[in-house]
Image (cartoon, helix red, strand yellow):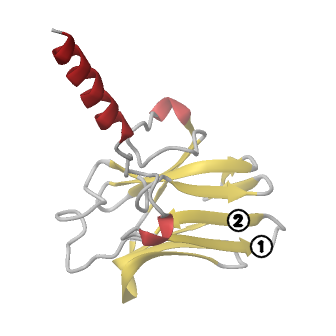
Amino acid sequence: MKKIVLLTALSGLLIASVPVKAQDEDPAKRPSPAAKTTETIKGGAVITIDYSSPALKGRTMGKDVEPMDGTVWRAGANEATVFETSRDITVEGKALAAGKYAFFTIDNGAEWTLIFSKVWKQLGAFDYKQSDDALRVKVKPGKSAVAHERLTYTVSKEGKVSLLWGNLDLSFWIK
């Protein structure tokens, strides 16, 4: 009986000592590397977008890879995309206070929903709750003239923010 208890205890210790790989791995070695864009827009706000940049690798958005129609997407890979503004701004004419936000989207076909969540530090959209939304706005997607293999964000000095991936150009205006 003592041997069974001892073996069970040793097995438990062995299992507990195996390193957890998930998000503790070196971010530089992830298939979707970390990326960041920062710009000071005309109104003086510094906009920073921290995200992980997945590649299409021959996959089709909405079929083989996110974003899927009608579901909340972290607008990147790994941790939720973080949208930060140093000053109060408007997004498509709606107020957003200075701060950090998780940035999510929902693909509704001809119209997308952009979501700025008050809970900015989270893994993907797994723990997303609509009750944590600071702002939601609707925008129409466009087609990019050039296909982008990797998801890329740009912010212009004029305040145009663009999410570019494949032929998708999901742009919106901030002031």
Q: Nearer the viewer, residue 27 or 111?
A: 27
Q: Nearer the viewer, residue 86 or 33?
A: 33
Check disc 2 and report the residue beneath it.
47
Check disc 1 and report the residue beneath it.
40
Q: Considering the numbered disc 2 on the image, is that residue within a helix, a strand or a loop?
A: strand
Spatial distance from mark 2 to mark 1, Cα to Cα?
6 Å
Marked residue nearer the N-terminal end (2 or 1): 1
Taking the spot 29% from the left edge, 36% from the top edge, the residue there is: 15
Q: Position of residue 175 (x, y in %)?
A: 73, 64
- Residue 60 visible, this angle: yes
Residue 57, quarter of picture: bottom left
Taking the spot 37% from the left edge, 50% from the top edge, the residue there is: 22
Taking the spot 20% from the left edge, 72% from the top edge, the residue there is: 60
Disc 1 residue type (three-letter): Thr
Position above or below: 9 against 108: above
Disc 2 residue type (three-letter): Ile
Marks 2,1: beta carbons within 8 A: yes
- Residue 175 visible, this angle: no
Q: Nearer the viewer, residue 158 or 3?
A: 3
Q: Nearer the viewer, residue 114 or 50?
A: 50
Is 87 left, or right, of 35 in this rendering? right
Q: Residue 115 shows which numbered tag?
A: none
Q: Position of residue 108 (x, y in %)?
A: 31, 54
Q: Considering the numbered disc 1 on the image, is that residue within a helix, a strand or a loop?
A: strand
Taking the spot 40% from the left edge, 67% from the top edge, the residue there is: 30
Label 1: few (<14), some or many (≥20) within 10 Å?
some
Q: Position of residue 43 (x, y in %)?
A: 82, 67
Label 2: few (<14), some or many (≥20) within 10 Å?
many
The quarter of the rendered structure image containing the N terminus is top left
For this orientation, the residue located farthest to the top is 1
